[in-house]
Amino acid sequence: MASKYDLTQRIAPQLDRHLVFPLLEFLQERGLYAEEDILKAKIELLNHTNMVDYAMDIHKSLYHSEDVPQEMVERRVEVVARLKSLEEAAAPIVTFLQNPNAVQELRAEKQHNLQMLNDRYQIGTEQIEALYQYAKFQFECGNYSGAADYLYQYRDLSMNSERSLSALWGKLAAEILMQNWDTALEELNRLKEIIDSKNFSSPLNQVQGRIWLMHWSLFIFFNNENGRTQIIDLFNQDKYLNAIQTNAPHLLRYLTTAFIVNKRRRPQFKDFIKVIQQEQHSFEDPITEFLACVYVNYDFDEAQKKMKVCEEVILNDPFLGKRVEEGSFTIVPLRDEFLENARLFMFETYCHIHQRIDMGVLAEKLNLNYDEAERWIVNLIKTSKLDAKIDSQTGIIYPYMIHNEIRGSYGYLSIKVEFAHTEF
C-alpha cells in the first residue's frame, strides 16, 4: 500500500541517472520495495555509468558473494584506461587552470582569451573540448566535485553554446549530489534564464527543458530555507504550470504541498484552487484530493480520510519525507507542518459554512481526540486572530460572521474572541 503513491517511476525519466540514486536510497531506507528489487535497480542504473567499483559492491550485496561477473572486471579496466586517456588529453588545459596567475589573465573578453591561450600556451578548441569530455567522465565516475570545477571552467572558456548548456546541466547535477543547495539554486536560475529566453532552440525543447528543470528543482526547493516559496514562484508561472498540466501532472503534489505549508501565498492560492478543480478528475493524488475535498467539494468526511493518507504519502516521498534527528527522536518537519495547516484549512472552511459547530464532530474531522481539539482551537483563537466563541460546557463553537479581509497567512478572521464558561 505504501508504494501505491510512490512517484519515483514517473520522476526518474526526467532526471540524470545519478540523481535517481538518492531516491533509491530513500526508498531502500523506508522499505517500500523489496531489498532485492532496489539493489537490482541500482545495478541497472550503474551499468550506464562509470561507477564500476560501486556496481561491484552492490552486486556482492545482492548475491551475497565476493565474486563478480567477468564483464564487470573488464569494464573496470576499460574505465581506468579511458580515464587515463582523457586525463592526458586534458592535461595542458588542466595544468593551465591550476596556475592562478595565468588564469587571472582570462578576465578579459573571451575571444581575446582564446587567442591568448592559443598563442602563449598552445591551447585551442580541441583542448577546451577535451576538458569537457574529461569533466563528463569524472562525473560518470562519481567524482562530482572535480566534475563541477571543470564544467565551470569549461563554460567560462567555451564558445560552443549547445555544449555549454549541457555543461550547465552537469554542473547543476553535481551541486545537487554534493548537497551544495545555495550554489545549486544559482545554477538552477541560470538554466531557467536560458530556457525562458526567446532564442532557445525550439518551443518543444523549451517545454522539455522546463519539465526537466522543475523535476531537478525538487531536490533544491525541499532542502532550501525558502524553498516552499521558491517552488510556488517557479511552478505557478503560467508557462510552467501549463507544462505541468499537460506533461507532468504528478508535480501538482509538490506545488499543492508548498501552497498548504506556505504562509504568504493566499491570493495565488485562490487561483490555484481553480487548477485543482480542473484537474481533480484527470489526476489522482491524496494531497491534491485533500485540497479538492476542502475547497471544491466541501466534503470534510472525505478530507479527514485523505489527511490520514497524506501523512503516509509525505513520510514515503523522497522529497517531502526529509528526516531530522533531534536528540533521540526522528522528526519529519514538513509532515508536521502539513498536518497542522491541513487542520487549519479544514477548520477555517468549516467555519465559513457553519454557524454552530460541535467540538466532538470537529475533533473527529481533524483526526484529534476531544481534548486535543479543544486545546488546538483555543490556541488557534489566541494566536491566529480567529473570530469565534466557545462554550466549553456544551462543547459548541460559534463562528462569528466571517470578514473578507485577508489577515496573516490564511486570511484569518479579525480578532474578536469570547470564551463562554471556560477557565482558560
Image (tube, rainbow, N blue to C red):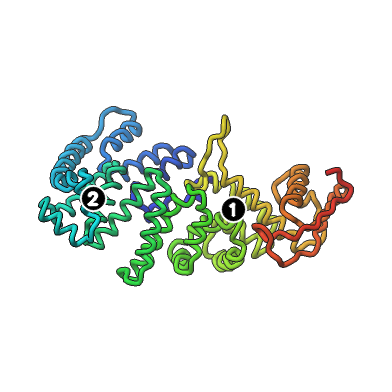
Q: Secondary structure at mark 1?
A: helix
Estimate the x, y position of residue 290 in percent, counting from the top left: 61, 57
Disc 2: which residue: 104
Total numbered labels: 2
Question: What is the quadrant of residue 385 in the picture?
Answer: bottom right
Q: Which one is in front, 102 or 29? A: 102
Residue 387 appears at what percent x and percent y?
78, 58
Residue 235 at x, y percent in the picture: 48, 61
The amino acid pointed to by label 1 is Val
Residue 320 appearing in the image: yes
Residue 219 image offset from top left, x and y in percent: 44, 49
Q: In the rendered image, which quarter contains the C terminus?
A: top right
Picture quadrant where residue 277 is located: bottom right
Amino acid type, residue under disc 2 in the picture: Gln
Kindly identify which residue carries mark 1. Answer: 261
Q: Earlier in the sequence, mark 2 or mark 1?
A: 2
In the figure, 198 relative to 138: above or below? below
- Mark 2 lies on a secondary structure that is helix
Q: Residue furthest top?
A: 66
Q: In the figure, is residue 122 to the left or right of 334?
A: left
Q: Is residue 127 left or right of residue 278?
A: left
Q: Nearer the viewer, mark 2 or mark 1?
A: 2
Q: CA distance from mark 2 to mark 1?
A: 47 Å
Give the residue drawn at x 22%, y 54%.
Answer: 106
| Other-residue count near label 1 (Cα within 10 Å), few / some / many at <14 / 14–19 / ≥20 | many
Q: Which mark is residue 56?
A: none
Q: Is residue 386 left or right of residue 115?
A: right
